[in-house]
Structure formats: C-alpha cells, structure tokens
Amino acid sequence: MGVIFIAVTLGGVLGFFLKWNDFLKKTTSNLQLVGLSVLLFFMGVSVGSNPDIIDNLSLIGLKSFSFGLLSVFFSVITIYAATSIFKRRTS
Amino acid sequence: MSLLVVITVTLGIFYGILFNDNPIVANLDFLIQATLGFLLFFVGLDIGSNRSVFKGIKDKLFSVLVVTFSIILGSLTGGLITALVFSMSPGEGLAIAAGFGWYSLSGIILTNIGNAELGSIAFLSNVFRELITFLVVPIIAVKLNYLSAIGPAGATSMDTTLPIISKNTDSHTALVAFVNGLILTAIVPFLVPLLYTLF
C-alpha cells in the first residue's frame, strides 16, 4: 500500500515539473510497455506456481470462472449504461 | 495489446507450473511489488504531466461515483446470477462477488467465516477476474468508452491493473480508476462478511 502511494506521488510531482517533449513521451511510453509485460509475466507465474489454484482448477474452475466473468460483464455494462445516461458530466 | 497480454500471462503460467523451484518463484512477491512500483511511477508521471488533470474536479468526482457504484451493482448482480446457476446461496454468491478482484483478502475472509471450499472459490473467482481484466481492458477502451474500461478491474484499479488501464486510456481515466480502487479496497473487508451474514 505504501509503495503505491509513494510511486504514484513521486511520478506525479516529477511529471508536473518535467519539460515534456516527444522523445520523453515516447521513452516513458516504451518503458511502460516493457514494465507491463514484465508485470503480466510475473502475475502469470504467481498463478502457475500456486498449487491452490492449479490443483483446484478441475473441481471449482468453471464455477470460479463464471463468477469472474459475470462480475466483469455486469460491471462493464452498468458503467456503460450509466455513462451513456450521464454523458455530459462523465465525458 | 490483448495479444501481448495473452502471450506474457500464458508464458508466466507455464513457467510457474513447470519451474516451481527457482529464484523467480521464491522472490515473486518482491518482484511483483518492485515492478508495480516502477509502473505506478509512470502512471504518476502521466497524470502529473497533464496540466488539465485536476480541472473540473467536481465532474471527476461524479465520474468516480458513477464508476464505483456501477461496479458494486454490476459485480453483485453477476455474483447473484452465478450463485443461482450453480445452486449456491445468494449470500455466498454476493460475498464472492464483493471481493471485486481482491483475491487474497476475500479468500481468507470466506475461509474463516464460511468454509474452505467457499474460500477457494472466492480466491479463484477473483484471480480469474484479474486475468480477464488484463485481457478485456484494451478491447473495452476502444469498443465502448474509457470509463467502462475500469469496470473489470474493480478494487485492483488502484494497483495491479492500473498500469494497463492507464496505458489504454488517458490520465483523466487513470485518476478516476485510482480513486475508484481506493474506495472499493476500503469497503471489501466490510462488505464481504456483511453480505455473507445478511443473505
């Protein structure tokens, strides 16, 4: 939790005072892509190396996947509907 | 972007299954925290570099309200329907969905106040929610709108999934996502046991 706030705040303050040019924008965008790939790989490893997940997959996999998918589906359509209703204030 | 997600996550999963005993797995928590810190620094840079990001704070708060409330309503609807399909009790379904992607905590809570199987389902459901989020955020940001792309993330939109939201939307959306994640993270510890006991 502490790391999150320090990282975002540090970036925010630096981002505010930096002189932004195209090179800097492109470099940070590329670094983000590299970092994101590394994070996604590690998240995958944390799933694959966890016996609680892999061993239970055949037993409760379908049930769990349904919970995940339907929560995502209804969250997205509810936001989409709400932002369509309040278009002026949310765009 | 979605292809990148599929490839990197799949590679990671197979790596985790095949090479269970190595330095990466042993130091995984630290590695994830470090990478996340690195990425959130760049999310901060994006937000800070945009001078207009703190303008219209009232409308931004309104957007947070719309997003957070919709995620709570949508997730619980999804949880309730899934519970009915698999003949579980409404309280179980609602409590699982109220993890909003925060798998470690919702799994622990429901193991304690419910049972081991319910805890495992809560854990795995919210792991799936996070994986699905990585996959669909890039698509939703293009096909629907930026705020809808926060929907899949739930409580994780303040940490693990914030980088992918930020990368696929803009700094305004990243800020809304961060605050949404903060609020949902704060209510998960109360909402999960409450829904389980009430229904």
Image: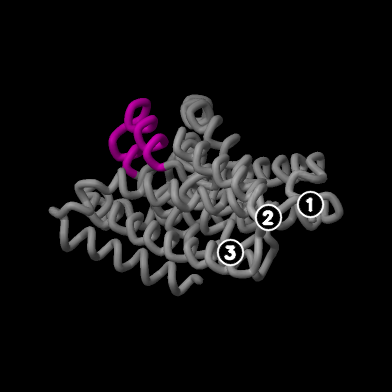
| Rendered view: A64 above or below B136 | above
State the image coordinates of residue B119 (x, y, percent, origin top left): 34, 37
Q: Amino acid at mark 3?
A: Leu
Tell me the tag on residue B198: none
Q: What secondary structure is the stretch in magenta mostly built from?
A: helix
Check whether the beta carbons of the residues at disc 2 and disc 1 lie within 8 A of each other: yes
Tell me the tag on residue A90: 1
Residue B196 appears in the picture as rendered: no
Q: Are marks 3 and 2 on the same chain?
A: no
State the image coordinates of residue B95 (x, y, percent, origin top left): 48, 36
Secondary structure beneath label 1: helix
C-alpha gap between disc 1 and disc 3: 30 Å
Give the letter of the chain under mark 1: A
Give the letter of the chain under mark 3: A
Q: Which residue is mark 2?
A: B147
Residue at image location 76% in from the left, 54% down from the top: A83
Rate crowding at label 2 as few (under 14), some (14 to 19) or many (20 or more) other CA atoms within 10 Å. Answer: many
Rate crowding at label 1 as few (under 14), some (14 to 19) or many (20 or more) other CA atoms within 10 Å. Answer: some
C-alpha gap between disc 3 and disc 2: 27 Å
**Marks 1 and 3: which is nearer the front?**
3
Q: In the drawing, does residue B193 fall left or right of residue B173?
A: left
State the image coordinates of residue A32 (x, y, percent, origin top left): 49, 61
Q: What range is drawn magenta here?
A: B103-120
Could you tell which of marks 1 and 3 lies nearer the N-terminus? 3
Q: Amino acid at mark 2?
A: Leu
Q: Is A71 contained in the magenta span?
A: no
Residue at image location 49% in from the left, 34% down from the top: B91
Tell me the tag on residue A24: 3
